[in-house]
Amino acid sequence: MAEKLLNYVNGAWRESAAERYLDVPNPATAEVLARTPLSPPAEVDEAARMAAEAFPAWRRTPAPARIQYLFKLKMLMEEHFEDLARSITLENGKILDDARGEMRRAIENVEVACGIPMLMLGDFAEDVARGVDEYMIRQPVGVAAIICPFNFPGMIPFWYLPYALACGNTVIVKPSERCPITLQKVFRLLEEVGFPPGVVNLVNGGADTVNALLDHPAIAAVTFVGSTAVARHVYARASANGKRVQAQGGAKNPIILLPDADVELTTSIVTDSAFGNAGQRCLAASLAITVADADRIFVPALAEYAGSRVVGNGLEQGVHMGPVITPQEERIEGLIQQGLDEGAELVLDGRGPTIPGYAQGNFLRPTIISDIPVGGTLAKTELFGPVLGIMRVDTVEDAIRLVNSGEYGNMACVFTSSGAAARKFRYEADAGNIGINIGVAAPMAFFPFSGWKNSFFGTLHAQGKHAVEFFTQTKVVVERWLGTWERKF
Ligand code: NAD
């Protein structure tokens, strides 16, 4: 029987007393890799109390000392880089190169958080009134809960974890129950780093575990990444409980193709964006809006390029796209059919493929569907699979209007050789992450990950300075010290 995953609480590995464990299958082979506990609320309570107990000493550890733990973590992550990337591929299905890219992004966030002594600096104003000085300091908020999705099991926890710790908070991480193995490995490294007991905690589980985190009085801050319905729930419930919350939700990332865009470069970039990680990136292009005769140029080019993608086990050399996470392929095929029933046209059909040697895997090949009607299922719904929809419009203005009519606002991109069109798009598009001749506009760790509309609930985003603000509260001190020499003036 596959190994049971453990929780890590107060510096010790613990077997959960959960009544239910879920299998974690490799989506390429269906082999069960591990079993993850649906930890009960009592185990969340234990982790939250331990994290709260560890907080006073951790916040008193000077920032330059706190970051020494992160330097050590960075070195260990480099040392175990290949093992972590392989673990991502095994549990998530993405190809090894994508998994390596993911771990690189995780490490970048550790590196940026190492700048905390400077990032956490406050402000000082002398003589705001006669003999009175005023200053603002940043203090950690307390215990932070970090709730994660399945699609970037190695990277997304790091949008938050290093900043929370560097700012002096203690943390509880709740990985996706579908991809919990990589974090188990990350916590082995956190253990090796030697954080004081209770500073970093791992609690595996599902919805009940999340709800226990949202309700726990000892938890001050909650970050969430996942689907919009759950993001909305997390935001509402945790903020009703008085916590600071940021919740990143789903996406439907439109990209505009203008006829003057470089054909070869655009085709390869858009194909990678739409079908990389089997379309399961929150920044996957899922709707291409072709302007004027761009469809004549790009639809055949995309179909040819996407049709040549090699689909298979992400661990194997030469594979461009792995499986989707189970059991999504049935859901995705259903949505494709619904779109076709509404009048859309199949350009490239990737449904029901046979992948030799992987009959049990959750595979789809790249699928392209054109003539999607405005307001149709494929125009609105997040499929989260290797499906690119195409809509046609006559002008750039129409294209931007279509982009802005969507309910999500995670990413929007334009492909063009016109600076004027690019500027108009950048200025007017209602999305937090904008790509100009870029297909996956993922911000580096020192920029915020800025979803808008139904892709985000909250104010401060993940990464960089936003994370520092999120994980600290400001305190303003107004101060007067009157000496005899001051009284002379
Ligand atoms: P999900 O919403 O199913 O799960 C995310 C987390 O929420 C998991 O930890 C899960 O245990 C928990 N959860 C699930 N149902 C719950 C419920 N009813 N109550 C409380 N907690 C619950 O998301 P997923 O399928 O793991 O991830 C894919 C989604 O995440 C996609 O919609 C994708 O767009 C989104 N995503 C967004 C971003 C972003 O930056 N905006 C990044 C990555 C993924």
Image (cartoon, rainbow, N blue to C red):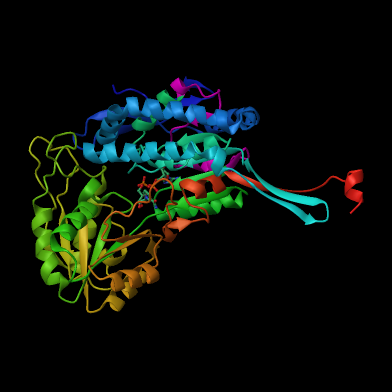
- The answer to whether 132 appears left or right of 387 in the picture is right
Q: Is residue 223 above or below residue 258?
A: above
Please provide percent x and percent y for residue 430.
Answer: 40, 67
Is residue 380 in view? yes
Please provide percent x and percent y for residue 32.
Answer: 26, 29
User: Which residue is found at the position 47% from the left and 25% from the top?
Assistant: 8
Between 273 and 484, the one nearer to me in the picture: 484
Please provide percent x and percent y for residue 332.
Answer: 23, 54
User: Which residue is found at the position 41% from the left and 37% from the top?
Assistant: 175
Placement of the C terminus among the 4 image quadrants: bottom right
User: Which residue is found at the position 25% from the left and 71% from the top?
Assistant: 418
Between 399 and 137, the one nearer to me in the picture: 137
Q: Image quarter for residue 438?
A: bottom left
Between 458 and 33, the one nearer to me in the picture: 458
Q: How many circles with numbers are drawn on the protein?
A: 0
- The answer to whether 75 appears left or right of 70 in the picture is left
Magenta segment includes 199? yes
- The answer to whether 347 appears left or right of 132 in the picture is left
Placement of the N terminus among the 4 image quadrants: top left
Q: Is residue 175 above or below residue 442?
A: above
Please provide percent x and percent y for residue 228.
Answer: 41, 55
Question: Which stretch is magenta?
Answer: 191-220
Q: Image quarter for residue 154?
A: top left
Magenta segment includes 253? no
Is residue 94 in view? no
User: Which residue is found at the position 88% from the left and 46% from the top?
Assistant: 482
